[in-house]
Image (cartoon, coloured by chain):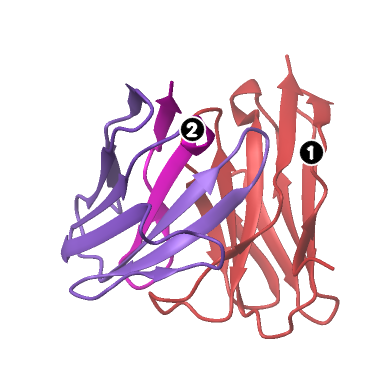
Chain colours: A purple, B red
Amino acid sequence: GAVVSQHPSRVICKSGTSVKIECRSLDFQATTMFWYRQFPKQSLMLMATSNEGSKATYEQGVEKDKFLINHASLTLSTLTVTSAHPEDSSFYICSATPGVTQYFGPGTRLLVL
Amino acid sequence: QKEVEQDPGPLSVPEGAIVSLNCTYSNSAFQYFMWYRQYSRKGPELLMYTYSSGNKEDGRFTAQVDKSSKYISLFIRDSQPSDSATYLCAMSASLQGAQKLVFGQGTRLTINP
């Protein structure tokens, strides 16, 4: 149980385009999902907390207009990186909680050329 | 001072050895403690969580919490090459869904055949 999926697993895009990443909880409902970013050999950096049916809460220093989060249902949250630039290249990971602890997706590797 | 301190390693041990991974923390509000395993280019996988001082065992893994010393450990017995990964400790003040996790930096572990 407690499976979280992400799609796509990998994406390469040109600078200036927007990229959408989906996070789904497959076998449980998640009122809260989290979005993280991870640079090589570093720990996870929390970007935002996503609550179903309400606006996301962004961490300090994270641009909410650049990283758009939508949590439309209890099993789906999306992160859209708008007008992506090479510095946005990173490993993006979501997590979801059924109320006990956080379960992570497999991550999405974004490369912006 | 970081809220959670974890030695990043790298740590390299021979197969079959007992591995000890540790984290210290400064926030006495932390009540719930988790260990995640992360393979390269994958999302973190929850190994264990505990909320009380003492030991919790699951197969070859034992999680130990000492709240008086603000110190947690993960022991791996009979270590296998497949245990080679980065191990992240994480903590929160609550298991409620909206509670953020605070992560350690992660320890890179290699088990040598």
Give neighbour class at mark 1: few <14, some 14-19, many 20+ (Cα, 10 Å): some
Taking depth in this image into account, of B110 and A67 the one nearest to the observer is A67
The quadrant of the picture occupied by the C terminus of chain A is: top left
Report the number of discs.
2
Q: Where does residue B33 sit, x and y in percent of width and height? A: 61, 68
Q: Which residue is found at the position 23% from the left and 60% from the top?
A: A70
Q: Which residue is found at the position 79% from the left and 38% from the top?
A: B18
Is residue B49 shown above or below A85? Answer: below
**What subunit carries mark 2?**
A
Q: Nearer the viewer, mark 2 or mark 1?
A: 2
Taking depth in this image into account, of A42 and B90 the one nearest to the observer is A42
Q: Are marks 2 and 1 in contact (CB under 8 Å)?
A: no
Taking depth in this image into account, of A111 and B62 the one nearest to the observer is A111
Q: Which residues are magenta?
A: A86-113
Q: Which residue is found at the position 44% from the left and 42% from the top?
A: A92
Quadrant of the rendered image containing residue B79: top right
Q: Residue furthest bottom?
A: B29
Q: Are marks 2 and 1 on the same chain?
A: no
Give the labeled residue for mark 2.
A89
Distance CA(mark 2)–CA(mark 1): 37 Å
The kind of secondary structure element at disc 2 is loop
Quadrant of the rendered image containing residue B29: bottom right
Q: Is residue B58 in sight in this rendering?
A: no
Q: Is residue A111 magenta?
A: yes
Taking depth in this image into account, of A83 and B5 the one nearest to the observer is A83
Badge 1 amino acid: Ile
Q: Is residue A95 left or right of residue A39?
A: left
Report the disc number at residue B18.
1
Q: Is residue B76 in sight in this rendering?
A: yes
The kind of secondary structure element at disc 1 is loop
Q: Where does residue B106 sit, x and y in percent of width and height? A: 70, 46
Q: Which residue is found at the position 56% from the left and 62% from the top?
A: A61
